[in-house]
Amino acid sequence: MQTATRRSHARLRNELNPPQKLIGWILLAITFLIMVVPMWNVIVLSTSTALDADASGIKLWWNRFSLEGYRYVFRVSKLGRPFLNSLYVTTIGTVIQVILSALAGYVLIQRELPGKDFITSFIMLTMMIPGDLTIISIYQMNKQFGLLNSYTGLILNGLVSGFSILLMRNYFLSVPHSLAESARLDGASEFRIFRGIYLPISTPGLTTVFFIEYVGKWNAITIPATILTDENKFTLPLMLRSLILQNGVSTSGGMIVPTNAIMSAVVISTVPLVLIYIFAQQFLLSGMTLGATKG
Amino acid sequence: MKSYLMKRISWKVLKKNRFFYVMLIPIAVYFILFNYYPLVLGFVNSFQDVKLLGNTAFAGLNNYKKVTASPFYQQAFVNALIVNVGTFLLQFVWGLALAVLINEMRHKFSKSLVQSVTYLPNLLSWSVVGGIWITILSPSGMVNGILQKMLGKDFRRIAFMAESAWARPIFIFTGAWKTAGYTAVLFLAAIVGIDPNLYEAATIDGASRFQQISHIALPSLVPTMKVVTVLGTMGILRNFDQVFIMGNSNIFDKIRNLLMLIYVDGITKFKIGLSTAAATMVLLVTLVISFIVRKLLKYDEAYD
């Protein structure tokens, strides 16, 4: 009885007092609204008529529900092609990247590999070179190898990152070394140890790398903007940019893309990421912070 | 010791490990071609006068002198510094406050809802975030709609994206809007990792929850704050995507930053020497800034 009262007393102390709580709730609610309202606004605008979407007002509810924005964006703006371009380039690139990161991460945990320190610093050093600062040279390099305006170029640029390799390495380090040792004594090949022991245990790490890289590639702007001029190869972010420019304050002439169409393109660009986020969410927190604290 | 090493790196050992070396070949090739080669190429080009046609000539430090003398690059440096430092500070405070407040939430569902929603903008590309805010801030957009509701009929709509006075605040705000949730995730992970015994001891000593936050949670977050700060300083002069998407001729004077200028000079105007010199300088300045920040924070000492 006495312990029970003591515990409830402790619980009481463990909460903020009411005014503090109220301030906290208000701050949270404001942030929540600042995050949610714009996104909700996008959804409403994308499913409104062009007339309603371009009219002034707060527009948080439909005047008339309509899918004409989505129709416009596929028929007139031809968003299908960039969507498929993005899907193709991102998916292939991410799958290859996960495989390469896992392989390299596995090499880096070998305790008795001659030259391991050199290899590790060779990889770590690439993280110090900010890719966006070398865009001019990256453009030249892509030109020299004939990668401008090609899917191969879009896939190859950014195909390996030191960050993902180190993330996989950190993950593999948490696998007990004795597992691999006993398998080795039983005569298992290195590849079997990698595939049979390390990969299955490391699903959260693999998912994290897949997620981070998928989002990064899907959203990439700098590299596509640098190596693409051919509109047929445009990825979604570039296409979206040209739609925005055709609607916004920056250009007055030319064809004006209605706001509901742009908001539809925004929704279409976002849906794949949200799906992947929902799928990967259960693994993410540990993986993301792993990268940030040990990177 | 040395002879031991020599013996270790024998043909036999290399052969035994050939599986690992073969695995590394594609990665080594990639890093050499896509990281080290462009770095060297840029460095070499920064000392040359690269012509579209004809020979390239050695230019010495001319490109560097041109960059430092250029009012455009000076302005871009100031713009990058103001916008990125502002964005960093805002998202830092915002993320920290979010993490602390989310941690105080007891209701599981609303807790994970707030966490997911605040993290969501971080998933979006600048094309998407730019598209959203350009629309919301347009003369017929939501912000003007709200202001009109509040201020009544006399209110004259503001074209936010076309007014240079609004440019920097908008860039700072949208930048923080995009990243605050991610920063909160980092802080939250550190808060969750705090030893519960500390809280228990404080409770027994009669500390209020507010005291627990300010005396236990915040001090425990210092290492994470340092990580976030050091990561932030690496990007302090670099932010291409936001300007590339949200910039327009009305406001470029206030927000055009170094990377944008390098991109336009190098790729559109083909001034390879000038732009690579600028990029090299940005790299060096970034390294210097991050060195100073690391020293100020005693970053490396804390982690050794």
Image (cartoon, rainbow, N blue to C red):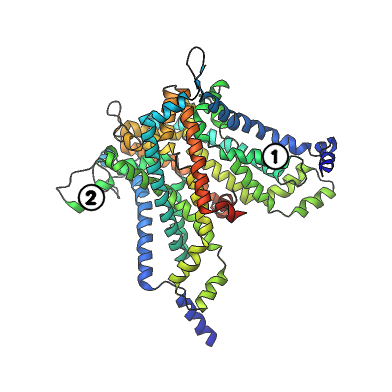
Q: Residues within 10 Å of mark 2 (few under 14, many from 20)?
A: some
Report in which chain the residue with disc 1 lies: A
Q: Tell me what residue is drawn at x 69 percent, y 47 percent.
A: A199
Q: Residue furthest bottom?
A: A1
Asked which secondary structure carries label 2, the reply is helix
The picture quadrant where one finds residue B250 is top left
Q: Kindly report which numbered mark, 2 or 1, lies closer to the viewer in this rendering.
A: 1
What's the residue at 80%, 50% (across, down)? Answer: A183
**Residue B150 image point, x, y percent:** 21, 53
* Label tally: 2
Left or right placement of residue A97 versus residue B61 in this view: right
- The residue furthest top is B54
Amino acid type, callout 2: Leu
- The numbered dot on residue A118 is 1
Residue B137 in the image, given as x and y percentages of width and height: 29, 43
Q: CA distance from mark 2 to mark 1?
A: 60 Å
Identify the element where label 1 is drawn. Answer: helix
